Image: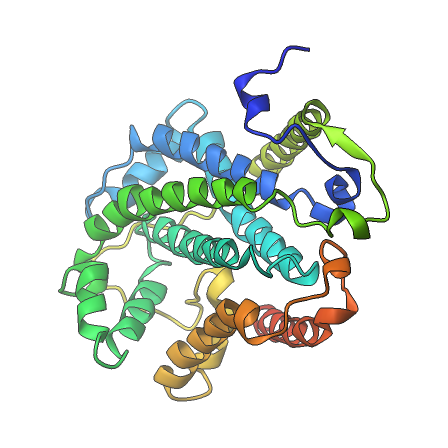
Amino acid sequence: MRPSYFHHLHPPTIPAAQARWRHTLGAGGTAIFLMLVIGVTGILEMFYYVPNPQEAARSVQTITYHVPFGWLVRNVHYWASQSLVVVSAVHFLRVIFTAAYGSPRRFNYLLGLALFVLTLMLDFTGYILRWDMDICWPLTTGTNLLKIIPFVGEFLFRVAIGGGEACATALLRFYTWHIFGLTILIVILGFWHAFRVRRDGGIAVPPPTLRIHAERISRNELVRREILMMFIVSIVLILLSIFFPAPIAPAMTGKPNPNAEAHAPWFFLWVQQMLKWGDPLIFGVLVPLGILTFFALIPYIFPKPDDADIGRWFPKSNRVVQVIVGLIVAYILILTLQR
């Protein structure tokens, strides 16, 4: 088969052992495909969405109930966004638990971490664009957390919502961040991340002299697997969209008064649980930033894993990292599931 442009985006061959699904979990390729799905469905929604506080929620209802197949486009967009958060987290943890973060991949590891943070921000801003009764509490709480950050809090607050009351004036600013600011950053860093994967030698593997299996697969086989993965993911997204519609609530009118049922998006529920414990600066800002800083410093404060361990699940040479990261993940999951 004559290689296409899509084929040439891949290396001619890659090690077969590290190309297996049980090694990669298909997370990197799935994340790229989900980004494409989010982009296409988001553009279709833009034809009907009105970024105006008086009309935004009604335009979402119009997309859902009146536009032909609008419900499907919106639901696919929603589930692709939620799936991207999960898949990005899995991909990031896979890199850590297979010791694939050491030199020369340290910088690309940071790019991947930045992409994960931007994905959370993109999902949160998309959540706010519903502009219904359910979004006021998380919007107010999130922007107030920005405000209490020492020295730069007021500046970040103005950047985020442009001043005024969050639930009254922030919609257009969040729409701009969602459509342009965050999306452009993700596209740029995404291309840079993919370029660095190729530049750093492709998927992380031991040096040739330490490899147990010398078998390699061609780019044609790799593309075949990726197309199969895209087909499976598409089916899952459609089934989720049919049986589990995206949340929708009455339009936000007047001055919203959050009730006891108000809650953050699922990926920030763990922060919401910590806010019940006391000082919001500590539990809403410093603890999440501390966890993020720890993840960023992993390649720099821990010894480089042994060459023979690179590309293997749970190698002994980065056991300390595995234990600490595992405890952090368990901590976040427990708090999230308490809701």
For the residue pair 134 and 202, the one nearer the viewer reads as 202
Residue at image position (17%, 57%) is 169
Q: Position of residue 83 (x, y in %)?
A: 56, 47
Q: What color scheme is it? A: rainbow
Quadrant in which the N terminus appears: top right
Residue occupying the point 41% across, 89% down: 278
Q: Say above or below: 279 vs 144.
A: below
Q: Quadrant of residue 118?
A: bottom left
Residue at the farthest bottom position: 278
Could you say where residue 192 lies in the image, as x and y percent from the top left?
43, 43
Q: Up-down: is 156 above or below 202?
A: below
For the C terminus, the image quarter is bottom right
Of residues 250 and 271, the one nearer the viewer is 271
| Residue occupying the point 21% across, 79% down | 151
Among all residues in the image, which is located at the extreme top? 2
Quarter holding residue 265: bottom left
Please provide percent x and percent y for residue 7: 59, 22
Query: Which residue lies at the image location 60% right of the left edge and 60% below the top edge?
Result: 101
What is the quadrant of residue 28 in the picture? top right
Relative vertical location of residue 129 with respect to residue 309 in this rendering, above or below: above
Whether residue 267 sits left or right of residue 177 in the image: it is right
Instruction: Please give left or right for residue 139 compared with residue 320 in the image.
Output: left
Q: Nearer the viewer, residue 54 or 185?
A: 185
In front: 263, or 296? 296
x, y percentage for residue 78? 47, 43
